[in-house]
Image (tube, helix red, strand yellow):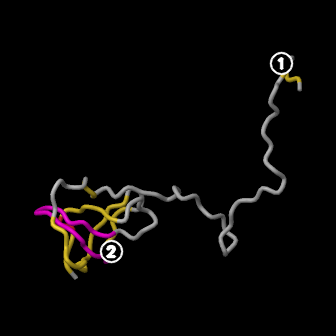
């Protein structure tokens, strides 16, 4: 193949004619696993020492999402320190299943 006098050993990639995006059951494009991921801005690093709960404690927590802003959500706390609580985050926007949040932003239900 010649292109401006230069021989191209590799032709330009062409997608297969039958290539289709993955669709969900409603016919919409299914997002990739990393689309929609947001950081929780008020989350802290894992502390060196903490106390594990014997049973999950029902709480209401204030989460501050990177793009969506502040949200109050009902969840459970599973561990704590004197200033932080580990709350379960069951949300597709989060990469992790939990976050360490200041105890001032966590209230028992």
Q: Is residue 62 left or right of residue 32?
A: left
Q: Quadrant of the C terminus?
A: bottom left
| Residue extent of the magenta highlight | 74-88
Q: Residue most toward the right?
A: 1
Q: Residue at x 44, y 63 (%)?
A: 93
Q: Is residue 37 magenta?
A: no
> Label 2 belongs to which residue?
73
Q: Position of residue 1 (x, y in %)?
A: 89, 26
Mark sitting earlier along the chain (2/1): 1
**37 in relation to 75, above or below:** above
Residue 69's disc number: none
Q: Nearer the viewer, mark 2 or mark 1?
A: 1
How far apart are the two marked residues, 2 and 1, measured between alpha carbons? 61 Å
Magenta part, dominant SS: strand
Q: Is residue 64 left or right of residue 10?
A: left
> Disc 1 on helix, strand or loop?
strand
Q: Position of residue 105 (x, y in %)?
A: 21, 67
Q: Residue at x 27, y 69 (%)?
A: 87
> Label 1 belongs to which residue?
6
> Disc 2 on helix, strand or loop?
strand
């Amino acid at each position: 193949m010649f292109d401006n006098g230069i021989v191209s050993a590799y032709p330009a990639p062409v997608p297969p004619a039958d290539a289709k995006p993955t669709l969900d059951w409603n016919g919409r494009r299914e997002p990739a696993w990393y689309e929609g991921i947001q950081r929780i801005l008020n989350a802290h690093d894992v502390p060196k020492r903490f106390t594990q709960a014997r049973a999950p404690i029902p709480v209401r927590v204030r989460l501050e999402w990177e793009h969506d802003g502040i949200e109050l959500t009902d969840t459970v706390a599973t561990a704590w320190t004197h200033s932080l609580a580990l709350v379960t985050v069951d949300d597709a926007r989060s990469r992790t299943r939990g976050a360490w949040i200041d105890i001032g932003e966590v209230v028992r239900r």
